[in-house]
Amino acid sequence: MIKVYEIKSNGFLGTSKEIDPKEGIGSGWTYTPPPSPTGSYKWLDSQWVSYDEPAVGIISPDLDKLSAEVRAERNKRLSETDWRFRVDMNPSQEWIDYCQALRDITDQEGFPLSIEWPVQPV
């Protein structure tokens, strides 16, 4: 008898069972045991990946595209404040700080994956 491990339709580890080696296994099963009997694992690229810890390097977002999207949103929010900075207007310090915080978005730790958007003054 040999132990096999179920790969659920969502990729996560399911049950295990003993089978006769002559039987073989069907789709949705693997002979590869998870690294530990406890924990949450997902089958990815022919190996078990722990979901108890961050899966660093498994998913690689297009950072250039994401950066461009964040900058576009920032620019949109800045353009919505332009009228407050006309020559005949006197913007409050709150609006000046808000606009500066928008400009500083790209300096935030975690940019572009994690953004803390400033709150627009009332």
Image: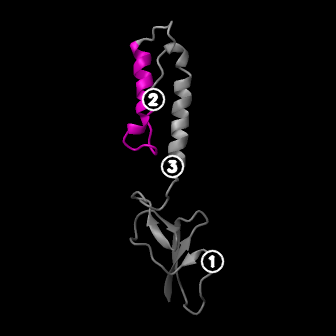
Please name the residue that numbered disc 1 is placed on: 27
Q: Is residue 48 above or below residue 102?
A: below
Query: Residue 102 shows which numbered tag?
Result: 2
For image coordinates 38% across by 71% down, the residue present is 36
Above or below for 17 versus 93: below
Residue 28, compared with residue 99, is above or below; it is below
Q: Residue 52: x percent and y percent?
A: 40, 58
Tell me the number on the disc at residue 64: 3
Q: Where's residue 44, x and y in %?
A: 52, 68
Specify whether residue 105 is painted magenta: yes
Residue at left 53%, top 19%?
A: 82
Q: Which circle, 2 or 1, is nearer the viewer?
A: 2
In primary-sequence order, the first of circles 1 and 3 is 1
- The image shows residue 9 at horizontal and vertical percentages of 61, 65
Callout 3 amino acid: Asp
Stretch in magenta? 93-118
Task: Name the element at disc 2.
Answer: helix
Using the numbered discs, state the Cα–Cα distance from disc 1 to disc 3 in whole angstroms.
37 Å
**Which residue corresponds to the image point at 51% horizontal and 39% vertical from the top-left?**
70
- Mark 1 residue type: Ser
